[in-house]
Image (cartoon, helix red, strand yellow):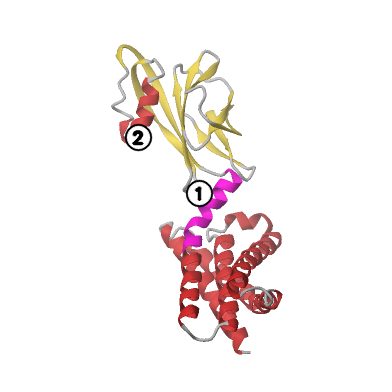
Amino acid sequence: MTHFVLATTATFIVAMATGVAAVAQNEWFGASDLLPFAIYSTVFALLAAPASVLAYRSTKRLPVWVAAVVAFLVGLLYGFLGTLAVALFLGPWMGAMSVPILQSWCVAAAFTFASAVLLWRLPFSRPLGLGLAGIAFASVGGAFAFQPALSLASGNQHLAVYFYRHVPGDNELDLSEVVGDLEAADIQLLRQTGLKGRLENRGYFASNSTEWPRAKALLVFTAATVRNATLPQPKRCTVVYVQDGSGFRRVLQDAATLERSMRIESGPTGPQLSVEDASGGWSGGSIDP
């Protein structure tokens, strides 16, 4: 009974701490989701206790430190399966949750499962304290690295699309309106387009389901008329697309791109940009070229 209470409490506390920290890092956007997250986490934590016992029994014949690592990995798997169960239960509503359930539950279960193995198999001593500290360190590190690692594995990225209007001229390209939004390397790419005159800032759109890795697409419109076009998304880099006749030319030509695309299409209120997300959905907005 003591183990059940401790395992349940530890799993719940770590899950909530990770979820709250993630919401706080996002300037408390989605804080209202913390209550349903707490309810789901209670069920998740109650089931974690018997699952941690199973992980312990399955690793009894392994050396204690190997068993702890295996239990840590099993905890990650348990967190994944728990998240999958909630996703199947909620359906499309899962995508509206602002609390990172997968990250929080994987970290919580990994910490609880691995700690339980050490507490059961080692006496209260310095090695036990060091082991628990190591698991805690790995869990905290995992909480910070989880989302970037997941983004890399899934091909997700933070994509910012900037829109510019080119005003022809004879002088070197004037970028005074755009330098505040871009880095030095981005400015250099715009100068490599060969354009002269100046660029006017026409806004931007961001597809930001993750903070890292990041990519930028700089769309330069050279005419008021915009034709439909399909452009590959830059892959963790900056790509400039310059309107050229009925299409767009890419700078640099050999820049890395994804198979996912960006679409420029005519809409009832004017040109529209649609960006394909890593999840398969689409997002976007109006363009004012």
> Could you say whether the residue bearing mark 2 is in a helix, strand or loop?
loop
Q: Is residue 227 left or right of residue 92?
A: left
> Could you say whether the residue bearing mark 1 is in a helix, strand or loop?
loop
Identity of the amino acid at label 1?
A: Thr
Residue depicted at 63% across the width and 57% down the height: 93
Residue 20 in picture, x, y percent from top left: 47, 66
Residue 16 in picture, x, y percent from top left: 51, 70
Tell me the crowding category of disc 2: few under 14, some 14 to 19, or many 20 or more residues within 10 angstroms, Cα based: few
Discs 1, 2 touching: Cβ within 8 Å: no
Q: Is residue 286 above or below residue 251?
A: below
Residue depicted at 35% across the width and 34% down the height: 183
214 or 287, nearer to the observer: 214
Residue 149 colored in magenta in the image? yes
Identity of the amino acid at label 2?
A: Glu
Q: Name the image quarter holding the N terminus.
A: bottom right
195 or 7, nearer to the observer: 7
Report the residue that reaches farthest toward the top: 170
235 or 268, nearer to the observer: 235
Mark 1 lies on residue: 210
> Which range is magenta?
141-155
Q: To which quarter of the image does residue 105 belong?
A: bottom right
Q: Is residue 46 left or right of residue 191?
A: right
Residue 162 in picture, x, y percent from top left: 43, 32
Q: Is residue 249 above or below residue 116?
A: above
Give the CA distance from mark 1 to mark 2: 20 Å
**Mark closer to the chain start, 1 or 2:** 2
Residue 183: image tag = 2
Report the residue that reaches farthest toward the bottom: 1
Q: Is residue 58 above or below residue 166?
A: below
Residue 238: image tag = none
